[in-house]
Image: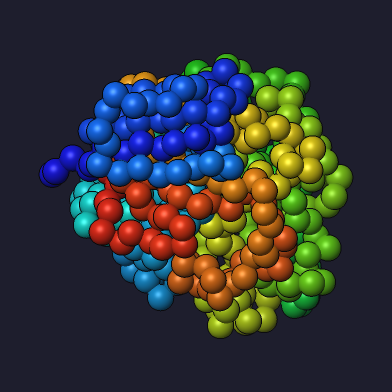
Amino acid sequence: MMSPPSLLIRRARIILPSGEFIVGDVLTRDRQIVKVSPSEIADEIPTQVIDADGLTLLPGVIDPQVHFREPGLEHKEDLFTASCACAKGGVTSFLEMPNTRPLTINQEALNDKLQRAASKCLVNYGFFIGATTDNLSQLLQAAPTPGIKIFMGSMHGPLLVDPQQILEGIFANGEILIAVHAEDHTRLKQRREEFANIHDVAIHSQIQDNQAALIATRRALKLSQKYRRRLHILHMSTAEEANLLREDKPSWVTCEVTPQHLLLNTTAYEKIGSLAQMNPPLRTSHDNQVLWQALLDGVIDFIATDHAPHTLEEKAQTYPKSPSGMPGVETSLPLMLTAAVEGRCTVAQVVNWMSTAVASGYSIPNKGAIAPGYDADLVLVDLNSRKKVRGEELATKCGWSPFEGWNLTGWPVTTIVGGELAFHQGELNIKTRGRALTFKR
Ligand code: DOR
């Protein structure tokens, strides 16, 4: 494959690995950052120059939990449309989940996804392998993968793994990261029966309640402690789980939160109905606050969107037929940067939660910082203007957002993947291709 041309970004406000900002130039060559300088870089003749005056340059976002629906569910999304949405949202790498059709539960399915991504993804990609009750031998061999995904509840079919002896077997064998969707299957089943005659979607947060999440998170933590196994808790949603981890979080455990669990709560059902339905469900404003504080205090390590698109037609069905999930890759960075501009956190924290800490948590080499030797995965954002979220302007195939109408700042102007422009001034460069991520063992 030919190397992309060298690229010179001029006069950007650049965030350094220390969290400080300088105004200066960045030069990339052969897919990597080669120079970061507060003064003009003049000694090179780059092929391409971008004037970034007034814009802020950040490391590209690494979104560590997305559902991109290919293969098998392409009427909702596919790897091309999803990666276009990533490029527009400043997401230069993603880690995708195994609940596609066929399920990603063996090396063959993993290879198939990697091949599809190589041919159509504008950004870099990695794919989880899903645990079932009988695929341990596949889990032990799978590569390259960020880790094993376990749905402890809130899933039907082979990806649901609840029996204790199977979970023990997965935690006891092998070394790669285990990422859990922590909702307790037994409690969910019992509460689904209890509330079966209620069709108001708001009941979703009561059926899949805080207790269901807490029980499963506690169970996963115990297993991880027993076997000293690297554990990541996906989309943590409750105050109770945040408090549990604040009390006792082993050094080999990480966890994440979604922008929607920080910024939306059960009041959203009144406004957007089933578009607010996801798993784990939205909680109360108290949960929002406790999660924010846990993130600020370093109890929560990073942000993931859990981008899980469904068509509006599917979402219009009566609960519980309406599917759970919402899109997110196009709005996550502006949502978090808007929070930063409003004083809820700093831009440096956003960069850490959405890029640096993710690269380190998943042992992805050479990503998550703007420094010589790092991959040239970058995003230039505009922190001086605001623009509303508009469903019809989104690249995601589902065409809607739970944040419709929100007036946000920090929208990406340019997204660079491996030194190439994937998105620039409103235009997607659909010829660019990302690469398979690697994970240090
Ligand atoms: O809301 C959700 N939707 N949560 C999940 O864990 C799965 C996802 C989906 O694939 O639709």
Image height of 163 relative to 153, above or below: above
**Residue 158 quadrant:** bottom left
Of the pair 441 and 159, the residue shown nearer to us: 441
- Which residue occupies 74% across, 25% down? 297
Of the pair 378 and 437, the residue shown nearer to us: 378
222 left or right of 168 in image: right
User: In this view of the protein, can residue 184 be seen by the observer?
Assistant: no
User: In this view of the protein, can residue 337 be seen by the observer?
Assistant: yes
Q: Residue furthest left?
A: 1
Q: Position of residue 57 (x, y in %)?
A: 51, 37
335 left or right of 372 in image: right
- Which residue occupies 86% across, 45% down? 286
Q: Residue furthest right?
A: 286
- Which residue occupies 34% across, 26% down? 42
200 left or right of 335 in image: right
Q: Position of residue 169 (x, y in %)?
A: 41, 32
Image height of 251 relative to 15, above or below: above
- Which residue occupies 32% across, 39% down? 7
Q: Position of residue 362 (x, y in %)?
A: 44, 30
